[in-house]
Amino acid sequence: MSRTKNKMKRRYLSATLMCLCLFFSMSSTAQDLNLKTLEGNATSLSNQLSKTMWTLVMVWTTYCGECAKQYDEISAFHQSNKKFRLRVLGVSLDGLNQRTKVRQYARIKNHTFPSVLAESENFSNKYKELTGAPFTGTPTYMLFDRGQSIQAYMDGPISIDALERFIDQSGQSKG
C-alpha cells in the first residue's frame, strides 16, 4: 500500500509541476481589481501584491472542500517563506458583502496568510485578462513576481514541493 501511495504521490507531483510549466504565462502585469480587506477597507490587487518579494495568490471560498484541504499546507508555506522569498495572499470569492463570514472562517481555519474579498464575476474577468484562460473554480493559484507580473497560474490543488521547485528554477530565490 505504501509503495502505491508513493507512486501516486510522485505522479501527482510530476503532473503538478508539468501543469505549472504548461500554464507558464507571458508575464502579464497585474491590473487593478477592486477588492476589500477583511477590515472593510477598499483596496486593489496591485496594492496587495508585494513589490519586494514574489506573491502566491490563493483564490478560495468558504464552501470549497479542496481549498480547506490546502489551508494548513499553504499557511505553513507562507510562514516559512514570508520574510525572505514569498508571501501568500488569499482572495476569497465569497463576495464583498461577506466580510464577517470570511473573517470568522479564516480565523477558524487558522489562516496565517492575509486574505481579501472579491466578487466572483469581476475576478473571473480579471483572471482571463491576466492569464488568457477562463477561470474554472477554486482553489486557483497565481504566482506574481516583484514587478507584479504573473509568472504562473494553476487551477486545482497545488503541491508545495512542485511550487518550490518552480520558484527555484525561475531564479526568484537568487534575488
Image: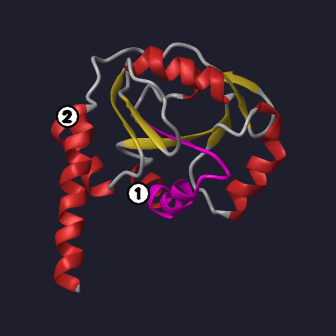
Vertical placement of 73 versus 119: above or below? below
Which callout, 2 or 1, points at the residue further toward the start of the chain?
1
In the figure, residue 25 lies in which quadrant?
top left
In the figure, residue 147 lies in which quadrant?
top left
Question: Which mark identifies residue 27?
Answer: none
Q: Which corner quadrant holds the N terminus?
A: bottom left
> Which residue corresponds to mark 2?
170
> Could you say where residue 110 lies in the image, as x and y percent from the top left?
63, 62
> Which residue corresponds to mark 1?
80
> Could you say where residue 20 lies in the image, as x and y percent from the top left?
26, 39
> Could you say where residue 143 lies in the image, as x and y percent from the top left?
38, 34
Query: Tag 1's secondary structure?
Result: helix
Q: Residue at x 44, y 61 (%)?
A: 73
Q: Is residue 52 visible?
A: yes
Name the kind of residue labelled 1 in the image.
Ser
Horizontally, residue 119 falls left or right of residue 39, namely: left
Q: Which corner quadrant holds the C terminus?
A: top left
- Which residues lie in the magenta part? 55-75
Q: Residues within 10 Å of mark 1 (few under 14, many from 20)?
A: few
Q: Is residue 151 magenta?
A: no
Q: Residue at x 71, y 64 (%)?
A: 108
> Could you say where residue 63 lies in the image, as x and y percent from the top left?
66, 53
Name the kind of residue labelled 2 in the image.
Ser
Please name whichever residue, 25 or 85, is drawn nearer the observer in this view of the structure.
Answer: 25
